[in-house]
């Protein structure tokens, strides 16, 4: 009889595990997410949406928040600020979300921040990186992603210790992201004694960059720094190859230069292109490699920093909701203020420094495309391959 009781207990336990967690009768906790799921930035939105949903599945499988599952309501901002503004208004007014996360492009994120602040609903920014976003003194805006001015941290040490350039040309797309990043990169170059020969913006989505690249080639820079979304990034490199434009290195300012689609679209012209990067699968953070491997297993392609920061955003959301005394905006904001945790994207703690408020700060990395693989090349202790510098001329590859 005793043996039979034990068997029944084990069977019941296995059945409970197989059926997943048992939630309370209370409704799910609604969290809004704003992402570009259609339009030119859809590839970024896709990788972030996949990562949000991966983390959501794991959080709810582990029991959710105080007996309640999280429900994500994901809205498509189409990459347009006015659509993003309407999306967050809907999330707050109609869906009654307790907080909002996501935000890819800086222009859209800025618009969403203004609404969140006005409505006093906490907004955890996943990506939108223009420095201005955390320099407005907004109480309800927190950012997990570093500001764009900090993207080149690893590049800066590489330039000082290895490349030692004298001159640079800076090309950037003309939205808030490109304008903010290029402005800050000029300051960095001036501080390093690197002469900026040319700094010029362009309208994203152009089909002919050759006039711009001919002008850049004539300036004969030691290196070219580009802030671009994915299709522009690939086209800039293909047309640089066609023009036989040969600086010692091309460097992307993250964004379009790190997605798998960059190498698909740029093809051979991607070879040896450097980029600033915010995360690699080799970072020494608990769960980072596991997240990367699980993403590849689930979606059949690699993920990168945009996905990691989306996954980490929901890790932070779950942590905050567990610690908040209730789900009012004030309580969630208080919990965000005391966040101090490790995520797959790195440590997260919202601090104020310089003009910035409630901003997370992280180290960055320098990567290089080598034979179709995005290799980490700097800093040395995290390198997966030695860097190739100066890069060979196009005709000698």
Image (tube, grey):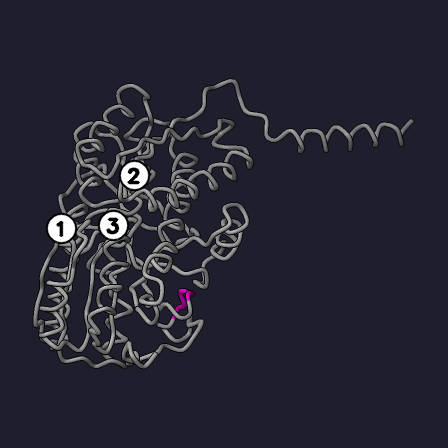
Q: Earlier in the sequence, mark 1 or mark 2?
A: 2
Q: Nearer the viewer, mark 1 or mark 2?
A: 1
The spot of residue 86 in percent (x, y) is 21, 27
Label 3 crowd bin: few (<14), some (14–19), many (20+), radius 10 Å: many
Q: Earlier in the sequence, mark 1 or mark 3?
A: 1
Q: Nearer the viewer, mark 2 or mark 3?
A: 2
* Secondary structure state at the residue bearing disc 1: loop
Place residue 73 in its image quadrant: top left
The tag on residue 281 is none
Please report the bounds of the magenta region as a residue range: 372-376
Place residue 238 in its image quadrant: bottom left
Q: Earlier in the sequence, mark 2 or mark 3?
A: 2
Q: Is residue 334 visible?
A: no
The spot of residue 196 in percent (x, y) is 9, 71
Identify which residue is drawn at 49% across, 56% down.
286
Query: Residue 26 vs residue 44: left or right?
Result: right
Gap in Å between the C-alphas at discs 1 and 3? 29 Å
* Secondary structure state at the residue bearing disc 3: strand
Gap in Å between the C-alphas at discs 2 and 3? 23 Å
Q: Nearer the viewer, mark 1 or mark 3?
A: 1
The spot of residue 207 in percent (x, y) is 19, 53
Q: With respect to residue 153, does 308 lie above or below?
A: above
Q: Is residue 374 visible?
A: yes
Query: Residue 287 vs residue 372: left or right?
Result: right
Identify which residue is drawn at 35% across, 72% down.
378
The tag on residue 36 is 2
The spot of residue 351 in percent (x, y) is 25, 51
User: Badge 3 is on which residue?
Assistant: 359
Quadrant, the N terminus: top right
The dominant secondary structure in magenta is: strand
Q: With respect to residue 107, does 366 lie above or below?
A: below
User: Badge 1 is on which residue?
Assistant: 203
């Amino acid at each position: 009889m005793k043996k039979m009781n034990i068997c029944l207990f084990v069977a019941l336990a296995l059945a409970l595990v197989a059926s997943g967690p048992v939630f309370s009768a209370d409704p799910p906790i609604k969290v809004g997410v704003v992402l570009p799921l259609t339009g030119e930035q859809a590839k970024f939105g896709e990788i972030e949406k996949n990562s949000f949903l991966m983390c959501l599945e794991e959080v709810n499988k582990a029991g959710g928040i105080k007996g309640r599952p999280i429900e994500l309501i994901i809205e498509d901002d189409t990459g347009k600020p006015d659509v993003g503004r309407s999306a967050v208004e809907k999330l707050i007014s109609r869906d009654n979300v307790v907080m909002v996360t996501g935000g890819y492009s800086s222009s859209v994120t800025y618009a969403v921040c203004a609404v969140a602040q006005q409505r006093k609903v906490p907004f955890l920014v996943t990506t939108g990186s223009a420095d201005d976003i955390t320099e407005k003194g907004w109480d309800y805006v927190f950012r997990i992603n570093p500001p764009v001015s900090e993207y080149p941290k690893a590049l800066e040490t590489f330039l000082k210790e290895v490349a030692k350039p004298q001159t640079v040309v800076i090309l950037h797309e003309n939205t808030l992201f490109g304008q903010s990043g290029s402005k800050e990169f000029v300051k960095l170059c001036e501080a390093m004694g690197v002469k900026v020969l040319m700094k010029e913006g362009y309208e994203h989505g152009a089909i002919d960059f050759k006039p711009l690249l001919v002008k850049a080639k004539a300036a004969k820079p030691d290196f070219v720094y580009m802030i671009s979304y994915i299709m522009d990034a690939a086209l800039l490199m293909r047309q640089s190859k066609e023009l036989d434009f040969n600086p010692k290195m091309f460097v992307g300012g993250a964004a379009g230069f790190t997605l798998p689609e960059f190498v698909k679209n740029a093809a051979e012209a991607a070879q040896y292109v450097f980029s600033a990067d915010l995360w690699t699968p080799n970072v020494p953070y608990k769960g980072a490699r596991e997240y990367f491997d699980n993403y590849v297993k689930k979606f059949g392609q690699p993920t990168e920093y945009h996905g990691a920061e989306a996954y980490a955003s929901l890790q932070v959301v779950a942590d905050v909701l567990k610690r908040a005394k209730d789900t009012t905006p004030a309580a969630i904001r208080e919990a965000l203020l005391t966040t101090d945790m490790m995520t797959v994207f790195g440590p997260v703690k919202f601090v104020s420094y310089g003009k910035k408020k409630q901003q997370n700060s992280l180290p960055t990395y320098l990567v290089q495309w080598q034979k179709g693989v995005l290799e980490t090349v700097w800093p040395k202790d995290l390198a997966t391959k030695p860097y190739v510098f100066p890069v060979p001329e196009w005709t000698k590859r």
